[in-house]
Amino acid sequence: MKKTIYLALLMCFMTLNAFSQLITYANPPDTLVLDNPPLDAPLTGLTGITPANYNVGRNTRYSVRVKETNSSEWKNLFVYSTFVNNTHGTLTKSNMSSFVNFDFSGSVTVEITWNSGPTPYNSNDVLIRPISKNIIPTVSNDKITFTLTEPGKFSVELLGDRYSGLHLFANNILNYPVPTGPNVHVYPPGIHEYDLSLNTQHKKIHIMPGAVLIVRPVSEDYSNYKARIKLLDNDEIYIQGGGILKGGIIGEDVSNVKIYGRGIIDLTNYRKQYNEVFNNYDYIRPITFFRCDTISIDGVTLNDSQDVNMLLGDNTNVEINNVKAFTRARWGDGIHMKGCIDVKIDDCFLRTSDDCISIYASRYTPPSWEETYLNRPALNITVKNTSLYADKAHPIEIGWHGNEERDGIEGLDIYNLFFNNIDILEHDELWIDPDGTVREDAGDFLGAISINCSDGNKCNNFLFKDIRVEDFSNGRLLSVNVESGGVGAAMTDGKTVENIRFENLSYNGSGEKPSSIKGINCERFVNGVHFENFTVNGVLIEELSDYNVGGVNMFNTNNYAYNITFQEANNFSMNLASGLYTISNFDNNQYLQKNSSLPYVNSTTISGSSYSNNQVWEVINLGTGHYKIQNYDTDKYLHNSLDLQAVNCQGRYIQTLDPLTMTAQEWKIVGDNTTGYKINNVYTRGYLHRSDETNSYLVALPKIDNEPRQQWKFTPYSPPIAFRKQLKDTNPKNINVYPNPLVDYININNLRIKNATFKLVDIQGRTISTKQIDSENSQIYVGDLANGLYLVTIEDNGQIIYSNKFIK
């Protein structure tokens, strides 16, 4: 028995170790390592803008080592220096910070020793972000220790200091393919200079651990790809862990390119913008792509760009995975996209001095810029499993830039964006002008999640799901606005914002400014902002007024922002059975009916009962809590128009249209015939409303409590028995009867029976017309027939050989 237990324990121990693995990277060459580099790197050249050296900074404030949890063998990590924008204001200050990289599986123990600065006394003095990861360290003497059982990207902060901490990137283990083929250029450990003539050749570049590849400008004119590697079709750059590229990468009008590995693209040595804007050089960014297709960027760390870390303009099919990025300079966005389509961003950590993620349509560029301008929307962009740390500006920014809707150019769509499983770690928009003036209200530049639809853009169909916002320094939680030209970065007015959904959005913090949901006018509106499980400091927000701090309403809205809903997902019922109904309004007992007259074709109205077919509706339970409502007369479906406005801009006309896949034809039907049913559109969240202002035409309006014009009664409808018995379509003889709908004549072809009997029956079961047909092809006049639903049958000696429903 003891032997069995011993073997079981041994097998358990062996299993744990078999699945634990730790990979660390080689250090950079000693001759390039500079401890604690200055904030401003030394420069040279005639105008002092080119790097004087290409040192690799090491931050000695921390020592870090890591081991497999069940092992006694520690491995030391090289602590790289980086720089982050230092707290409030314009970009006049930055702090040296640090980061480490390693790969693992299973379980590892991390030990951080602080070598200088204030000393934390216990675990309460150490904050490890994202807080959602619930990493609680042990603090003893001068050491912080914690265990990781899954990969992650963390910011370790001591004594409330956001800016001098340690960033720890614990990657999963991934075996990247090593480039092969005749065009491979391998750079082994050591210092190397890139040959700019390779920019005109197809190539695969392999930077090995311990190698530093320098892309040196040949003059102070940085244009023409100097100080950058230019990619051609099918090119690859593989930077292994411990490898460093000192220069940028650019691709224009190319396809199928890859940048991958656990290495670093480091621009720390280049001049940075702060208060001034430099016009005498073209910015060197780690990664730039214009008008490209099929781009893969995986695993790399981007350190200290001259402005945007990753600039993507008018690209298609982009995949960005496990990228880590730092900026401190003006316009230091993390991933900046204009006119991009089909982009997938996953498992990234972006700490930036401007927007972490920015998404725009193609931005109008004047001819003097000499840029190829593609007039493209921004479509199908997904960001997931990512941490956003905006030391300045927005963690998420959407919509500021477009083609400006000018000179006859129409606005563009920003459509179908999905943010999922996001940790927002900071948002700071406190401005300090160069003269020292403090501007605490940055207006519409505020917003941890900011939709600023400008420049003619139309912004719609965005989903933010499982978003956790930590306490931030200065700003507001949400901006969902159509912006006016001249406000913020808007050159011209935006168009519309529609169908914005927040599911499982949580904010834990204090001191934020009120959020904003606003349109401009009836033509430039916000229609549909929907919250499901939105909590502030653990309190569920179920209506706008619930988000209140110290008596201050924390949502600012106006009359041009509507259909703002909370907890609608669970507002459904399947109690109403499928079947035929008439639908009458509680307010005046009049009936919903299809009406093809003006103001809009296929609109719906309400009128007294005429028992006509256009007042009969088939209610179809879809089994999802949603229903479709089909007119019995026309077979068309009740549809919430998206653009036919009515009633003080907030309403939309209700139509009957042919079947569409969109949920504007799906409805929730909740209630009963005693208190009245509410009929709520699934897509717009507008409620079916009898409007006095539209001459009894039906509209969808935002929900109004205790409003009888939004309450409805469903009365089951049964066609007369004689009619119901014959409703089944049949045509065994392949007789051709047309047209349907009827106009003036019914045409009958291919009738090979002599003395057949034609019958026309109305919905009440009454026989309207009977005729004997002796020829193969016949025509019967029905021009005087009243509009409605009819049954046409053809009999042979009393046996029905044809039957079908016809509409007149």
Image: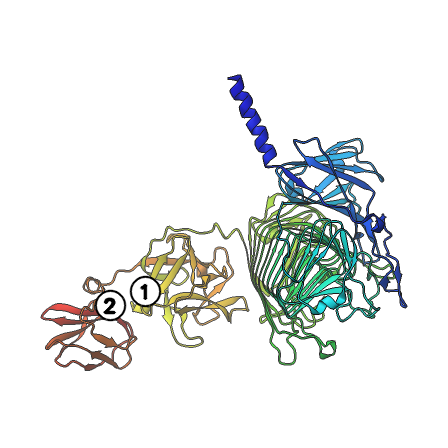
Q: Position of residue 753 (x, y in %)?
A: 12, 76
From the image, tell me which residue sits under label 2.
763
Tell me how far mark 1 sits from mark 2, CA to CA. 11 Å
Q: Position of residue 797 (x, y in %)?
A: 9, 70
Circle count: 2
Q: Residue at x 67, y 75 (%)?
A: 372
Contact between marks 1 and 2 (CB within 8 A): the answer is yes
Quarter of the image for residue 406 reads bottom right
From the image, tell me which residue sits under label 1.
616
- Say what amino acid the circle numbered 1 marks: Val
Give the SS element for disc 2: loop
Which sits in the foreground, 138 or 637? Answer: 138
State the colouring used for the structure image. Answer: rainbow
Q: Position of residue 688 (x, y in %)?
A: 45, 62
Q: Is residue 403 above or below residue 172?
A: below
Circle 1 packing at 10 Å, graded few (<14), some (14-19), many (20+), is many
- Say what amino acid the circle numbered 2 marks: Ile
Give the SS element for disc 1: loop
- The answer to whether one can see residue 326 in this image is no
Which sits in the foreground, 20 or 611? Answer: 20
Q: Residue at x 14, y 81 (%)?
A: 775
For the C terminus, give its image quadrant: bottom left
